[in-house]
Image (spheres, helix red, strand yellow):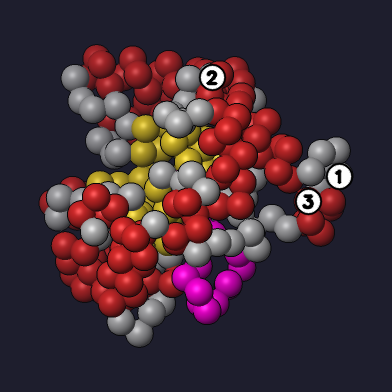
Amino acid sequence: MEQVRNRLIVALDFETMDEVRQLVETLGDAVSYYKVGMQLFYGVGMECLTYLREKGKDVFLDLKMHDIPNTVAQGAASLTRLGVAMINVQASGGPAMMRAAAEKVAETAARLNIPRPKLIAVTVLTSMNETEWEALRSATTISDQVVHLARLAKEAGLDGVVASPQEASMIREACGEDFEIVTPGVRPQGAALNDQSRVATPAAALQSGAHYLVIGRPITAAQDPCAAALAILEEMGKA
Ligand code: C5P
């Protein structure tokens, strides 16, 4: 289980620090990596990062930046200074934006002599289904677009992408072994789908080439979150 522990990222999709503390205490040593998204970060700000650092946890700060290259690069520099392990941008912001962010993250970390956070790109949200996709008048299929955006991210110098488990193997093939794939939309057998459309089980996600699994509600909304996390880690360990 040890070799998969740092590949499970539990999504702290909460509003208050009380909920965060309760879950992190409950999960204890079972979980070492957490995702802080917009709900929590916009709500409580730095308090959650300070708390998670004190607990010795790694943080994926999932703010999905999307703006002009200079603005995203400066934002990425600010997030680098926070000392988190992973940050992200929307690949649809384009190659110049991704390149500017990657350069700024590397430069900032080197200047401050701190570890460089991994910079990854969001391809297409895992909640996107064919109906939603058509509403955007997209000219390609979802999977073609995911692979295309992953290639652009790699060329721009990013470390990896967020993508659904169903696209992981195509990305592996297109971008190689070293390019990291972070997959939300993971659901153990029989778990509620919630609003996710393109899902896979933890074992299937790893087998198709995912490096990190981001899992929220199957753990955070479970009757016994620690048992749920341990069951997922066990399944990951066998994969
Ligand atoms: O509760 P659930 O397991 O669906 O949580 C998945 C997490 O991953 C959420 O925090 C969601 O915002 C995030 N995410 C996603 N799809 C992406 C990127 C991030 O579901 N493409």
Which region shows up in magenta? 182-196
Q: Secondary structure at mark 3?
A: helix
Q: Say which mark, if any, is on residue 126.
A: none
- Residue in the image at 71% along x and 43% along y: 143
Contact, mark 3 vs mark 1 (Cβ under 8 Å) = no
Amino acid type assigned to the residue bearing label 3 in the image: Trp
The residue positioned farthest toward the bottom in the image shown: 223
The answer for how far apart the CA atoms under marks 2 and 1 are is 26 Å
Going from the N terminus, do you reach mark 2 or mark 3 first? 3
Amino acid type assigned to the residue bearing label 2 in the image: Ala
- Residue in the image at 31% along x and 19% along y: 108
Q: Is label 1 within 8 A of ligand 1 (CB to nearest ligand atom)?
A: no
Q: Say which mark, if any, is on residue 133.
A: 3
Q: Is residue 36 visible?
A: no
- Magenta segment main secondary structure: loop
The answer for how far apart the CA atoms under marks 2 and 3 are is 25 Å
Contact, mark 2 vs mark 3 (Cβ under 8 Å) = no
Residue bearing mark 1: 137
Instruction: Classify 10 Å Cα crowding around label 2: few (below 14), some (14-19), many (20 and above).
Output: some
* Image quadrant assignment for residue 111: top left
- The number of callouts visible is 3
Going from the N terminus, do you reach mark 2 or mark 1 first? 1
Residue bearing mark 2: 156
Instruction: Classify 10 Å Cα crowding around label 3: few (below 14), some (14-19), many (20 and above).
Output: some
Q: Horizontal placement of 198 versus 130: left or right?
A: left
Q: Position of residue 223 (x, y in %)?
A: 35, 85
The answer for how far apart the CA atoms under marks 3 and 1 are is 7 Å
| Depth order, front residue of 164/94 | 164
Q: Secondary structure at mark 1?
A: loop
Instruction: Classify 10 Å Cα crowding around label 1: few (below 14), some (14-19), many (20 and above).
Output: few
Amino acid type assigned to the residue bearing label 1 in the image: Arg
